[in-house]
Image (cartoon, rainbow, N blue to C red):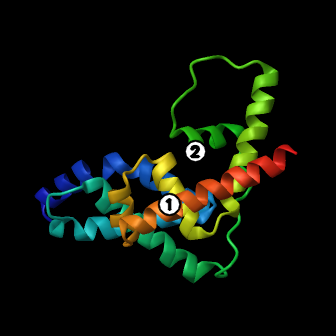
Amino acid sequence: MTTLAKARFAQIVLPRIDEGYRLARWLTGSATDAEDVMQEACLKAYRAIENFAEGNARAWFLTIVRNVAYSWLQRHRPAKFVSLEDVSLDLQLEIETGGLMFNAVPTPEDALLDKQRAAELQGAVEELPLHLRETVVLREFHGLSYREIASISKVPIGTVMSRLAKARQSLISRLKEIEH
């Protein structure tokens, strides 16, 4: 690998490692599995960096992460069962907020309610079928546009829109059930 390729990798991929990890974490449901996915995704990106044409580097890298995650799931998990192991409140907040810190210092009661709501949301997201979960995570947690999601998922924009609508409706229904 040339020095130029190494520099391109550092410029294009390294700033997106955390975002790629968050996507892998959501898709695999496990921090350990997400690390495995990211290692493989980074190797693939490193090998392909010389072929990357200038464009949307974020979509390019997240597509690699997504594809590696799906391949990893096929090799290591039953097709219909993907569970999320118990995670700490700090990790839940990091996943849900993209690593941003809240401004207000919560009271113990607020922290308990937030933890409960976070667990309920996380559980509702985990119950979504993988294709809906992927779409809602890319949109709501990564802030990608419909076009970027369509590019990463290799589906038409209309499919992204319908998947997002189905995912949101399912989440709303599930969270209403939990409240009652």
Vertically, is 39 above or below 95?
below
The residue tagged 1 is 135
User: For residue 95, which numbered disc appears in the image?
Assistant: 2
Label 2: few (<14), some (14–19) or many (≥20) C-alpha neighbours in 10 Å: many
Q: Identify the secondary structure beneath mark 2.
A: helix
The answer to whether marks 1 and 2 mark residues whose Cβ atoms lie closer than 8 Å is no
Q: Identify the secondary structure beneath mark 1.
A: helix
Q: Is residue 33 visible?
A: no
Vertically, is 78 above or below 106?
below
Return the residue nearer the eye: 8 or 169.
169
Q: Residue at x 25, y 55 (%)?
A: 57
Residue type beneath disc 2: Ile
- Residue 135 at x, y = what percent? 50, 60
- Residue 158 at x, y = what percent? 40, 66
Left or right: where does residue 6 sit relative to residue 85?
A: left
Q: Residue at x 67, y 58 (%)?
A: 170
Question: Which one is earlier in the sequence, the residue at label 1 or at label 2?
Answer: 2
Return the residue nearer the eye: 26 or 153.
153
Q: Residue at x 56, y 81 (%)?
A: 74
Quarter holding the C terminus is: top right
Vertically, is 22 above or below 89?
below
Q: CA distance from mark 1 to mark 2?
A: 16 Å
Residue type beneath disc 1: Thr
Frontmost of labels 1 and 2 is 1
In which quadrant of the rendered view does residue 153 lie? Answer: bottom left
Quarter holding the N terminus is: bottom left
Q: Residue at x 74, y 39 (%)?
A: 117
